[in-house]
Image (cartoon, helix red, strand yellow):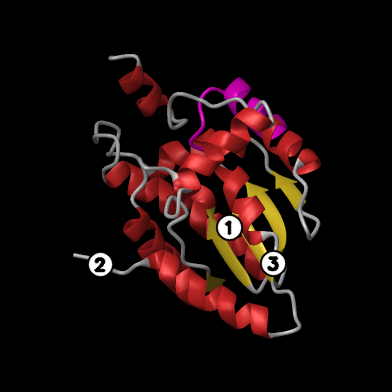
Amino acid sequence: MNNINYQKELDKIIENIAKGDKIPTLLIHSCCAPCSSYVLEYLSEYFSITVLYYNPNIFPKEEYEYRISEQKKLIDNLPVKNAIHFIPTEYEPEKFHQAIKGHEDDKEGGERCFICYELRLREAAKYAVEGDFDYFTTTLSISPMKNAPKLNEIGLKVGEEMGVKYLVSDFKKRNGYKRSVELSKEYGLYRQDYCGCVYSKLERDGQ
């Protein structure tokens, strides 16, 4: 069993950064504006951040586009120490369906989700390498419904394979999730009631 406290590991990294005079660059994969709200508020003090919105799992297309607009609204209005840049991506659901083929009937939170984590983290790592970022990470660990140890395991593996450092996290710690709910209300953000993929939507609808 993985008993690593990823928040404490992140504390150590931030402590070292704070001692230096360089602001490192960080590419953050974001699943949605509400989940990113606390993460951006927290990390923008220590990093020069670019948010990548890459989520081919989202269904339907209108949901994808709405989440992008909400992400942009948050970035445009959130008061932060260092400016935040934004990279939206095109809607490519076929990549998600190809990746999870054979796992369509998996339960939410199972292997299908882990494949989806890796799909998105690999794309984030690719952008991080191409943009010569110091680190990459994801907002996904803020959700109580997401497996933080698995996310960090995948992120570290992908980062090592692709030659870019993965910033470990468990953003739900220290009331991170609670703060994201507060910020969502403050900025009037749309909080979706399903993870995003068609299978989570069906499960929400009891189908």
Q: In which quarter of the image is the N terminus?
A: bottom left
Residue of label 3: 47
Residue 6 sits in which quadrant? bottom left
2 or 3: tag closer to the N-terminus: 2
Residue of label 2: 3
147 relative to 136, above or below = above
Residue 50 sits in which quadrant? bottom right
Residue 35 sits in which quadrant? top right
Disc 3, SS = loop
Residue shown at 69% from the left, 31% from the top: 187
Q: How many marks?
A: 3
Work out how far the residue at label 2 is from the one at label 1, CA to CA, in angstroms.
26 Å
Residue 63, position in %: x, y? 58, 24
Nearest to viewer (mark 1 / mark 3) = 3
Q: Which of 117 and 4 is in front in this view?
A: 4
Residue 41, position in %: x, y? 65, 52
